[in-house]
Amino acid sequence: MKKAIVIGASSGIGRALAKVLAANGYELGLAARRTALLEELQKEIPSKTYIKKIDISETVFARKLLRELIDDMGGADIIVINSGISVTNKDFRTEPELETLTVNVMGFTAMTNVAVNYFLDKGCGHLVGISSIAGLRGSAVAPAYNASKAFVSNYLEGMRQKVNKTKIAVTDIRPGFVETPLIKNHQWAFWKVTPETAAEAIYRAIKLKKKVTYIPLRWLFVAMAMKIMPEFLYNWGYNIIFDEEKGGSNGK
Ligand SMILES: NC(=O)c1ccc[n+]([C@@H]2O[C@H](COP(=O)([O-])OP(=O)(O)OC[C@H]3O[C@@H](n4cnc5c(N)ncnc54)[C@H](OP(=O)(O)O)[C@@H]3O)[C@@H](O)[C@H]2O)c1
């Protein structure tokens, strides 16, 4: 039986991905803070599941809990680190910035460390990190979120280099906008896909052991343009999308 762990399975993309993995015959480890939601999910999926309450911002304890979950399951073939938060910080307060980094950077790093060390001991495995197109450039709306996702993609590339002589695969998933609670206040979001569509695309990327995947694919072309776009042009486009008078969210 193939085994996968989804960290951040209680909602949105992680929840949908857990269902897709279960439908494809995976035993599942489901982790997040809201265990009531994980228990609801457990009832909806046919395969054997293990639930673990993990708050990835408590990095020391979270590492211990992830190791326990792997042991409880008798091992894991795939570990998906999906947990993440995004706080719109128009007033540029300190707390939302630090909170975002604690979860998306510190928590992500802690979980990656456990996963990669486990796979190195085992000799194989597949690490999947959920980054974002937000990691491509900076953003005034949520500066820490974009910077944190730049970290995630960069870190995953480093991990891939680290394990390149092993049978460990590392996949960096970069979704555009997905209709989940994370973007519930982003009226300006466009090209939105459902969590189910995103989950199917992530599963395809996992099966193909892709290094980097944009969801949907059209973001690949946007990403190529954004990478080389001069700052004045990027800012011009950004201001059109985020101008509050035009329905955006950059009102301050
Ligand atoms: N929605 C989008 O448009 C979009 C686009 C690109 C990338 N992403 C990324 O996709 C991932 C999933 O987001 P989503 O859109 O599905 O949002 P979501 O529905 O809000 O789900 C976020 C998940 O992260 C978990 N989480 C948050 N803080 C956590 C913590 N401290 N410890 C453990 N788990 C934590 C949540 O579980 P608990 O609250 O139960 O702990 C939940 O399961 C995130 O990394 C996000 O950055 C989303």
Image (tube, grey):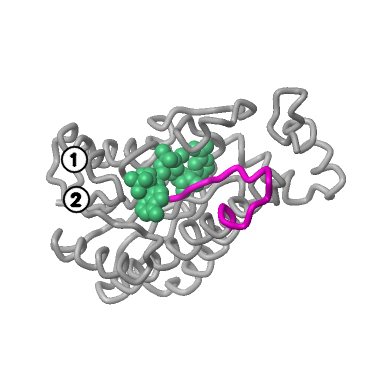
Q: 194 or 183, which lies in front?
A: 183
Q: Main secondary structure of the magenta part?
A: loop
Residue that protrudes farthest toward the top in the picture: 246
Q: 228 or 100, which lies in front?
A: 100
Q: Is residue 57 visible?
A: yes
Tell me, yes or no, whether the two marked residues, 1 and 2, touch with CB atoms within 8 Å.
yes
Residue 97 in the figure: left or right of residue 125: right
- Disc 2 target residue: 51
Cβ(mark 1) to ligand 1 < 8 Å?
A: no
Neighbor class of circle 1 (other Cα within 10 Å; few <14, some 14-19, many 20+) is some
Quadrant hosting residue 88 = top right
Residue 180 in the figure: left or right of residue 64: right
Check residue 28 for magenta coloring.
Answer: no
Query: What's the CA distance linking mark 1 and mark 2?
Result: 8 Å
Q: Which residues are magenta?
A: 84-97
Q: 221 or 91, which lies in front?
A: 91
Q: 75 or 135, which lies in front?
A: 135
Please state the quadrant of the image where ligand 1 appears: top left
Mark positioned earlier in the residue sequence (1 or 2): 1
Is 182 situated above or below 167?
Answer: above
- Disc 1 target residue: 39
> At label 1, which amino acid type do we have?
Glu
Q: Position of residue 237 (x, y in %)?
A: 79, 36
Q: Position of residue 136 (x, y in %)?
A: 65, 51
Task: Check disc 2 and report its element: helix, strand or loop.
Answer: strand
Name the residue located 21 percent from the left edge and 48 percent from the top edge. 28
Quarter of the image for the C terminus: give it. Answer: top right
Q: Position of residue 72 (x, y in %)?
A: 13, 61
